[in-house]
Amino acid sequence: MVKTIESTVPIIDFGKFLNGSEAERKLIAGDMVKVMREVGFMYLVNHGIAQELINEMFAWSARFFALDENNKNWCRHPEDGAHHRGWSHVGKEKVSQMVFDRDLVKQLRRQPDVKESFDLGNENGYYSNIWPHDEDIPGFREFCNGFFACEDHTAKQLLRAIALGLGLDEEYLLNFHKTSDNQLRLLHYPPTETLALQTGEKERIAAHTDFGTMTMLLQDSCGGLEVEDPHIPGLFIPAPYIPGSIILNTGDFLMRWSNDVLKSTLHRVRAPPIDSKTGLAQRRYSIPYFVGADKDVVVDCLPSCHSALNPKKYESISSREYIAMRLRATY
Ligand SMILES: O=C(O)CCC(=O)C(=O)O
Ligand SMILES: [Fe+2]
């Protein structure tokens, strides 16, 4: 049987959590945690972020990436990989999966990802944002900041649901996400020779898991995102855009925090359908929002995720220590 996304990545109606009765809220929270345990990826519909706002964010993203290279250079990502802000040109970044060996990282970087990105965080955060000149793209900064806040609002509702589904106090996870230390990432994968993507000579984004607590992912209709089958390692299943949906996936930090009860699943971006006019793999835009825990708060295993039969597997760790370790392997 051909595996389809519907049979692997479930669709959850989050509106029933946002506006439902106490019983419905509990049911949805339980469903979400079940999916996080089994698959690590879900589609959310009625998630509370207005579609017009999402469309507008994609339009701003396209406008930003269409800027002249000199204008984008003004806000380029610093060499320090930990300061994850600003524009990274095509070829700058290589996402890798848990590779900490310096020589191996060097070797992997010879085949960089064919994508460019723009990263921003909370304006009041530890790392300053790096913006393009306002006159080059007036209104961009303001819109991005508004969108960041809107996603943060939804992220907080999702954190409530996950805590509830884990049998914790609904506010439990919010107490570790007080500073909104999240990252909004605009991604642009330019048109690329399909064959090079198919043979793996070039990659859009190699198989990886995300670092943080969780990721909310917006994608356009191009296609190419694939999620590893939870039961068949190495089998990747296409996760196309479902109108009106966003994707929610568990991050590595939450996986560790939950004693591996919640799964952070491998995913990648491969060749989408070929553009019939150019013969190239179509351009893709996506917008992940990485939700991160407060950097200096040390987390120990979640209370409902360990027992005498299932003892704690990991030392307690702060998100700062954990993320720094992962970023060093990426830049
Ligand atoms: O472009 C996409 O849809 C995937 C992006 C992604 O997985 C990431 O940036 O971590
Ligand atoms: Fe990812």
Image (cartoon, rainbow, N blue to C red):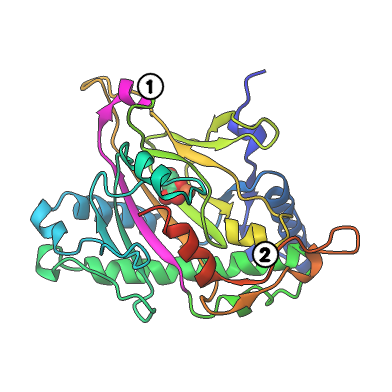
What kind of residue is marked 1? Answer: Thr
Q: Residues within 10 Å of mark 2 (few under 14, many from 20)?
A: many
Give the vertical position of 82 relative to 225 (above or below).
Answer: below
The residue positioned 20% from the left and 68% from the top of the image is 139
Count how many numbered circles sit on residues in the image. 2
Question: Magenta stretch containing residue 224, yes or no?
Answer: no
* Separation of residues labelled 2 and 1 (CA atoms): 37 Å
Q: Which residue position is annotated with label 1?
A: 199
The residue positioned 15% from the left and 67% from the top of the image is 138
Residue 18 picture location, percent across and down: 62, 65
Residue 88 picture location, percent across and down: 26, 54
Left or right, 175 with respect to 54, comes to right
Give, as a single range, the part of the protein colored magenta. Answer: 181-199
Quarter of the rendering containing residue 206: top left
Residue 115 picture location, percent across and down: 30, 43
Query: Looking at this view, is 108 or 139 the one in front?
Result: 108
Quarter of the rendering containing residue 214: bottom right
Q: Which residue position is annotated with label 2?
A: 257
Direction front: furthest residue: 103
Q: Residues within 10 Å of mark 1 (few under 14, many from 20)?
A: few
Label 2 residue SS = helix
Quarter of the rendering containing residue 327: bottom left
**Could one spot residue 86 in this view of the protein?**
yes
